[in-house]
Image (cartoon, rainbow, N blue to C red):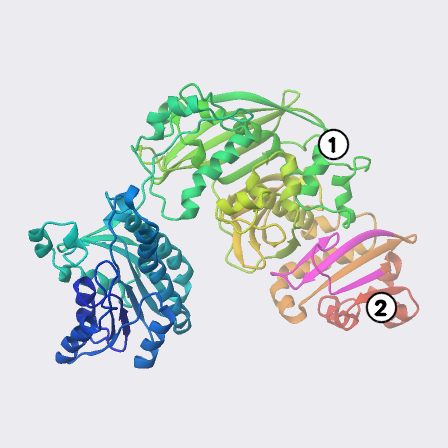
Amino acid sequence: MSLSFEGRVVLVTGAGGGLGKEYALAFAQRGASVVVNDLGADTKGGGKSSAAADKVVEEIRAKGGKAVANYDSVEDGEKLIQSVLDAFGRIDVVVNNAGILRDRSFARTSDLDWDLIQRVHLRGSFLVTRAAWNHMKNQKFGRIIMTASAAGIYGNFGQANYSAAKLGLVGLANTLAIEGHKYNVYCNTIAPVAGSRLTETVMPPDLVAALKAEYVAPLVLWLCHEQCQENGGLFEVGAGWIGKLRWERTQGCTVRRKNQPATPEAVRDQWDKICDFTDATKPANTQESLQSIVTVLSQVESGEINMNPTTAPAASVSEINPANAVGYKIPPSTFDFTHTQCILYALGVGMSTKDPDHLRFLYEGHSDFSCLPTFAVIPSMAAMMDGGLGAIPGLSIDLTRILHGEQYLELYRPLPTSGKLVSEATIADVLDKGSGAVLLLDVNTYSGGELVCFNQFTVFAVGAGGFGGRRTSEKAKAPLPPPKRAPDAVVVDATTRDQAALYRLSGDWNPLHIDPSFAAMAGFEAPILHGLCSFGFAARHVLKRFADNDPSRFKAIKVRFAKPVLPGQSLQTEMWKEGDRVYIQCKVKETDAVVLAGAYVDLHGASGASPESLTQGDGLQSDLVFAEIGRRVKDTGSELVKKVNAVFGWEITKDGKTAAQWTIDLKNGSGSVQKGPFSGKVDVTFTVADEVFMEVVQGKINPQKAFFSGKLKVRGNVMLSQKLEVILKDYAKL
């Protein structure tokens, strides 16, 4: 099906001859209404005439097309675009084609030679496009062409002024492509080679005649059609040939290490590597361009890159030989710590004295002072942060291009709150994913010679794939999807603006998490939260919701890092309990973006929601009642959630002191009964003595009488208490 421009309005600047004329004729032939702009000046910008534009308009009209002439300078962009709107009521396409030449060798280029070229080519294209921009945005359609030149891309003797302006147009077009994309306003750049008034000064006559302008027009029309989704492209075109250009960059070489200056001698010694285009990368945007530099800065500051600038570093070109790498043991690393690091880590993953249950992780004088289970990732990271990955045989990878993809942690006994931990890391496997290599790094951590925990880091080395290795490994701890049903529990926990600043004190000093300018270089609007910080948040949500904050109940956790979190955003942990495994999915509440996927936590023993465990209470009579409620919820929870849609909290007292807390959640998932406080919002809370509770349940005392006499206290939505009848109807009507 042929491409049509019916209903579209096209402006072509410099359309009185050459390329511009061919564009105008071609657009008109396919139904567009065309504004033929030409000042009528000579090739050096002198003079003015309406004849050139008028002649093209006459030719279009003679063929049945729609066109008007315009004689304004491109420096009068607003006036020019207004004439388009006056003639046809809209503007859909702008082809910035107008140009002049003032060729001089650089030493002979005058201020006027320089300024005039910039005014017509670069400033003129800017002014015309700016005048059309908002009209295109408002109508959610626009196509813009900038005209560059091989002289701008490669340089050309005697054309310093022209080359600078033409390459400037490429930069302008690239930014417009980014800013206009969401409005369906696309901008592309062409570098045409064709016979024209301008090229006849730098090409032989026979070549000028052979390189017809009509050979360029088809590319311009396609780039300006609504079907074309190309945006931000740069194309060389001529003689019926079209080629797309892109930037290419060597793998490069890092020439410094932490606390040591970079020297010109190091640059000299690594010059061949710096300039080696073997396996070159092709960054497509500013973020990709800066990512390697940002990663290098991070690696250098953390000490992960450990190389002598005056000697050959690890190869920046990835070379993988799994047979040599698998089984390699990285030298052991030692981690000395006290209770201070345990507390600092707990604060870093969001624990607070606002929650009394958190005090056991925040106060070294607490009778049950403990270390959070996920603190175990901190000592094990030293194996990588000490530069161990840079010296593995058969594993020459670019350390600036590695990503932390997944994490598995298993505890064999609760962590001590102080002491010395020794971690031993082994390359468990190396996988070929095509676009990169996956390294499985197994880390065993010991305390006093006794194995305390095991970590498996899954590291993705970008661009290191294609070596013919296996894609999967039986050694990998695989992520698992959650059940296809509503979650059993949901916890929403806000991070603070300073969450990353606090978490990094536990040992991850990457400036990406603290320095706004560094984060901007990496393409983020602000410093991002550490993935392992979100990991810690989600783990403690499970620990509280299903294990009464008892670290000894915690067995293992597995997560895949999906997307970043900004400090200050809220983490929403969704949990599905099946046996001793709790499947989890963590999202940013504000955006609904999944940040931890395929995740789960394994616990020792049954959870607090199990009816069997509910009977093992503190010798309170009410424990038996809640055990019965737990059985009923387990059998008919989904139905009860639909009827009740509320969360009830219970504070059972004995001898005037709180002896037990219970949560009946008939709002989330399929309902649950949990010993302990609810981590989210409770709709109504009852406070009652154990013996009074039993009298009410057994019908010996009217609940309203108990309420008015002060024996039964209620906080929150009192009316919701009536809904408890559906689960306690065989005992009493509460």
Q: Which residue is mark 1?
A: 339
Residue density around tag 2, few if under 14, some if 14–19, many if 20 or more, within 10 Å: some
- Looking at the image, can residue 30 be seen? no
- Decide: is 541 above or below 334: below
Q: How many marks?
A: 2
| Residue 686, x across and y down, in percent | 81, 62
Residue located at (30% from left, 81% from top): 87
Image: magenta residue range:
658-687
10 Å crowding of disc 1: few (<14), some (14-19), many (20+): some
Residue in front for this viewpoint, 526 or 204: 204
Q: Could you tell me which secondary element the residue under label 2 belongs to?
A: loop
Name the amino acid, label 1: His
How far across and down, in percent of the image, does residue 404 sit?
Answer: 49, 39
- Disc number at residue 628? none
Horizontal placement of 398 versus 605: left or right?
left
Q: Nearer the viewer, residue 624 or 378?
A: 378
Read off the residue under disc 2: 699
Q: Give the quarter of the image for residue 3.
A: bottom left
Quadrant assignment for the C terminus: bottom right
Q: Amino acid at mark 2?
A: Gly
Left or right relative to 497: residue 189: left
Query: Looking at this view, is 717 or 2 the one in front?
Result: 2
Q: Is residue 161 above or below residue 463?
A: below
- Which residue lies at the image location 86% right of the left edge and 64% below the top edge? 713
| Dot 1: element | helix
Q: How many angstroms separate mark 2 from mark 1 (CA)?
A: 51 Å
Furthest residue toward left: 206
Q: Is residue 530 above or below residue 304?
A: below
